[in-house]
Image: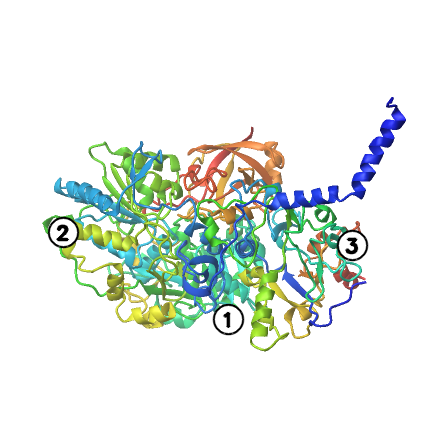
Amino acid sequence: MQNVPSHTKARHFGMVIDVDKCTGCASCMVACYSENNVSFRDEESAKMLSLNWITVYKLTNGKPFPDTEVCYLPQPCMQCDGKEFGKPPCVSVCPAVATDFDWPTGIVSQIYTRCFGCRYCMAACPYHARQFNWWDPVWPADMEKYLSPNVSARTRGVVEKCTFCYHRFQLARQKAYHEGRSEDIKEEEYQTACTQACPSGAITFGDLDNPEHEVYKLKQDRYAFRLLERLNTNPSVYYISKRKWVHRMADNYLEGEVPRAFAEKEA
Amino acid sequence: MKIDRRCFLSLAGGLVVGHLLSPVPWKMTDDIAIWTQNWPWTPVPEDGPVSWKETVCTLCPGGCGVKVRTIKDRVVKIEGKEDHPVNRGSLCPLGYASIQYLYGPSRVKTPMKRTGERGDGEFEPIGWDEAITEVNRKLAALRENGKSHKAACIAGDDRGTVPYLFKRFLEAYGSPNFIRTPSGRDAHETAAYLAQGKTALNVGFDLENATYILSFGCGLLDGCGAPGYQFAAYSRFGEDHTLVQVESRLSNTAARAGKWLPAKPGTESALALGMASVIIDKGLYDRNFIDNHAFGFEDFTDDNGNMHMGFRSLAAEYRPDKVAEITGLDARQIESVAVEFARSDKPVALCGYYESRITADIDKTLAVHALNALVGNINQAGGMFVFPEPEYDLPAVSKDSIASDATGKPRADLAGSGQYPQSRYLLNLLPERILEAGNDDLPVEALLVLDANPVYTLEDSKKVQEAFEKIPFIVSFSSFMDETAKMADIILPDHHFLEGYRDVPAPDGVGMPVVSLSEPVVDPQYDTRNAGDTIIDIAQEMGGDIGKSFPWDDYGDFLEKALSDRYQDMSSNGYVVNRDRVADVADAFETDSGKYEFHPIRRHTPNNGDTEKLPGYREVGIPGGNLNNGVTLVAYKSPRIASGAVANPPFMTKTIDSKTLKEDKLFIQINPETAGNLNLKQGDKAVIETPAGTATVRIDLFEGIMPGLAAMPAGLGHTAYSRFIAGKGVNVNALLRAVPDPAYGMNTAWGIRAQLKKA
C-alpha cells in the first residue's frame, strides 16, 4: 500500500457548494474554460461532444405550476478519495497511470501526455466528470493568444477533467516557498477559478481537514450531502440544500426512503 | 508440407504468443499513443512576465470593474475587481468570456467599405484616411442639399463622453436626430419627469443596502440590467434579506427569491396599486414624507376649481380581492407581502430596468415609484435614487446658419413632437417611418451607428432590415461584424474595451452616481480607432464651424478636459462616486409643486388624446390579440445568453443546456398543460407563427411557466459575427412586434399572440 509522503504536509482540498444559493448563471463554467484552456467548437450545442470541466445542471422538483421549484447544481470533478483512501474509481482502472491520486492534496490528477485515450476512466466515473477529445482543439484566427501558459492545451485522443486548478496550487506553493513559508499556504492564496468566479458566493473551497478553513465547518452542516454517497466513492465535493427533493435527486433513493439529513427529523 | 487446421492454429497461436512475448506490441502501442498526440499544431502558449491590470467592462451597460491577467502582451484571463463599487468582485459570464471578443474572427480588423449588395456582407478593407474622406463627402453633400436634418445617429447610450461627441457632432452639423436605443431607462425617465419633474437623470435602486426587494419582473439574477451589481448585492444577502419576485415564469431570479408571485403578465401595475392600497389602509406609509414632500396624495382642487382624485382614492379602487382577480394571485398573499414590504427596515420596489423584455409601461413604472414614495425611500440608503446625468464643462458648439436652422426641426423618430411631446427617444417608431416614406422623402438619409445593433435588437427584425435597406448611407462604428455593421456602407471599427480609453457613467439601475474609467490594458490588436477619435477626425476634416466645435487634439485630450477635476481621481482609482450629486429629499423634486407628485400634473399636458392623469391599471394590448386557441409568446432572459448589442461569445454558447439549444435547434418552454392541449410532447418539432414571423422550434416542457405562455430565450439566432455565433437558434425579436404607448410612443407590448403547431 502507498503511504502518505512524509516530506510534505498532507492536505485534503475540497469544495462545498450551496445549491440554495446558486443562480445557475454559469460564470463558473466560463471562468473555468478561460483558466484551463478548455477548447470550443463551432458546434457547441451538440452537447455530447462539448467539453466542460464543470457543468451546472438544472434541477426541477417536477411539481405543477405554481408550486414548481428550480435549483442549479454545479458539478466539477468530485476528486473522490475512494472507498479505500487514495483509490478513486478512475485511478484504479487507468492502465497508463495517467490519472493518479495526489496524496499531499487529495486531488485526482490527469496527465495528458500519458493518457492514450482508452477511456476506462470515463466508464468508471459515476459522475460523468471526464471527457474525451474526439478532435484536435483548434483556436480560430488569433484566439490562441488568450491561452494560459499554466495549463497545457490538450490534443486529440486524450481524456481531460477538472483538476481543482492544480496549477494555482503550484503557484501558491512556489510563492510560499519563495517567501520562506514553505508549507504555509493561506486559504485565500489557493482558490479554484470557479470558486473565485461565482458571483453569488455559492462555492467555498479549502482544506476539508483544516479546522480553520470555511469548508471544514460547512461540510458538517446538517444539510450537507454528496452525490451518490452510497457508492462509497467519497467525493471531496459537498453540497448544501435545505430542500428535500434536491437531496433525493443526489442519490438513488427507493420510494419511501428518506435522505439522511431528513431521516432524524421525520423519525 | 500440408497445412492442416491443427498446424494453422498452432502457427497462429504461436505468432500471437510470440508477439506478446516480444516488445513489438508494447512498443507499437506506445508509438501510437505518442503519434496520436504528436501534432505540431497543438499550441504551446508562450510564457512570460505576468501582470494584473484593471479596467471596466463595457460589453453591456453594467459597467463592472475587471482585473485582467496578462502574460507579456497577451490577455489570458479576466476576473471581477474586488474593490469596484459596482460589482465588488462579481462578474457575469459575458465579462469572463470577453477575451473571446478581443481576439477572434468576429472583430472588424480595419476600416471597411461595402462592395456587394447591402446586407450581403461583402466588404473590402480601406485605409482610415480614405474611409473618413468617403464619410465626409457623403455628409457634406447631404448638408449642401439642405438636408442636414436627415442625418441621424443611433447610439446604445446617451451618457458618457463618446456619445456626447456624437451628439455634439450632430448639433454642429445641423441635425436633431441623436437616438438612443430603447432601454429600461425610457420608462423610468418618463416616470421621474412626471412625478419628480426632472429631466436628464438616472434612476437607480440601492440594492446594496436594501433589505426587502420587491421586484416587478426584474431579471436581477438573469443577467439583465447591471448583472455584476445585482449579483454582488445578492451574494451578500443574509437571513434578514427578502427578495420577492413578481413574474409569470419561474426565472432564475424567481427560483432564488424568497417569494415568487406568479402574476399574469401585464397586470403588474394593478398589483403595485393593490399593495399601495393595503399600505395606505393600514397606515403603514411614511407620514413624514407624505406630509412634507408629497403632492396629490389626498384629493385636491386646482386653481380653476376642478376636483382631482388623489392617490389615496385611486389606490382604494384596487382592493386586494379585486387585484387578486386581475392578477390571478391570492388576496392574502398580496396583503402579507405589502405589509412585510412596508414594515421592513429598508424596502425598495423596482421594475423596468433589468427586465427580460424592455417595455415602457408608464402606469406600472409610476405605480412602482409610488410604492417607493409611500415608504419614503427616495434618495435614502437602500431606496430609490434619482441623480442627474454627468455634465461636461466645455466650450459651446459653434453653429453656422445651417446648424442654427436645424434647431427645432422635427426629429425623425417623432420624439418630442406634438404627438409624443414628453418622450426623448423613440427608435422603435423609426423603421415604420422609413418604410412609409417615399425614396425621395426619407426621414433618414445618412445614419451613424454607435455601440448599437438595432437590426438585431429591435422588434420585428424583418421590417427593421427592410427599413435599413432603404437608408442610402450607413456608417457603423462597431468593433464586431454584427448584423447592423453587415448592413453598413462604411465600417470605422472602434477598439475593444481592453484596448482604449472611455468613461463609463452610472450603469442602468445602479443606486449610486458612479463614473468609471476604462483604460487600455493591451495595445490595439488590429487597425482600429477609438470612436471618439474618429468622430473628432471627421468633424475637423469637415472644417468650418463644425471643425471649430471640436478644438481637441484627440479623444484623450478631450476626455481629460471634459472630466476636468474628476479625471485625476478616475485615473488613479478607476472610478469616482459623486455622492454629492444626490439631492437631499427636500430639494429633490423639481415639479411645479416642488414635491413628489402622486398625481402628476405634467400628465395633464395634452398627450395624443390620452386623458389618464393618474397611474392606474389599463390592460396592455399585445399584437395578434384576436388569435384563437393560440399561446402568448414571451421572450425571456438567460444569464447564459448575451441578448444585447453584443452577441453570445462561443464560451457562453458552450454553457447553454440541451433543453434550451441542441444541435442549433432552439427550444421554447411551455407548460405541460399547454402542451397537452396542443398535443405536443417534450422534444417535439413545432412551428410558431406570430403576426411578425414564423420559426421552427423544439418543445421543452417546463412546469414553472404559466399555462398559455410560450417562452423563448432572447439573444440567439444571430446571422452575422462568425460561424461560432451565427445560425444558432432563432432570434425572438423576429417574432415580436412593438405596440407604441398612445401618449409616449414607447413600446408597451410584453408579448405577442402566436399559433403553435406540431411540425
**Outermost residue, front direction?**
B1
Residue bearing the label numbered 3: A231
Category of crowding for the residue at label 2, using alpha-carbon neighbours closer than 10 angstroms: few (below 14), some (14–19), many (at least 20)? few
Mark 1 burial class by Cα count in 10 Å: few <14, some 14-19, many 20+: some
Chain for numbered disc 2: B
- Of A96 and A242, which appears nearest the observer? A96
Left or right of residue B125, residue A116 in this image: right
- Is there any visible trace of residue B646 in the rendered image? yes
Residue B98 appears in the figure: no
Question: Nearer the observer, disc 2 or disc 1?
Answer: 2
Q: Position of residue B321 (x, y in %)?
A: 53, 53
Query: Residue flagged by tag 3: what amino acid is it?
Result: Leu
Which numbered disc, 2 or 1, marks the residue that appears first in the sequence? Answer: 1
Q: Quadrant of the N terminus of chain B?
A: top right
Does label 3 lie on the same chain as label 2? no
Determine the chain carrying the residue at label 1: B
Q: Residue at x 47, y 44 (%)?
A: A140
Which amino acid does the dot numbered 1 rest on? Asp
- Circle 1 is placed at which residue position? B345
Return the residue found at the far left. Answer: B401
* CA gap, disc 2 and disc 1: 59 Å
- Left or right of B560 on screen, residue B15: right
Q: Label 3 marks which chain's residue?
A: A
The residue at which mark 2 appears reads as B543
Q: Secondary structure at mark 2?
A: loop
Question: Image quadrant for the C terminus of chain B?
Answer: top right
Estimate the x, y position of residue B196 in percent, counting from the top left. 32, 62
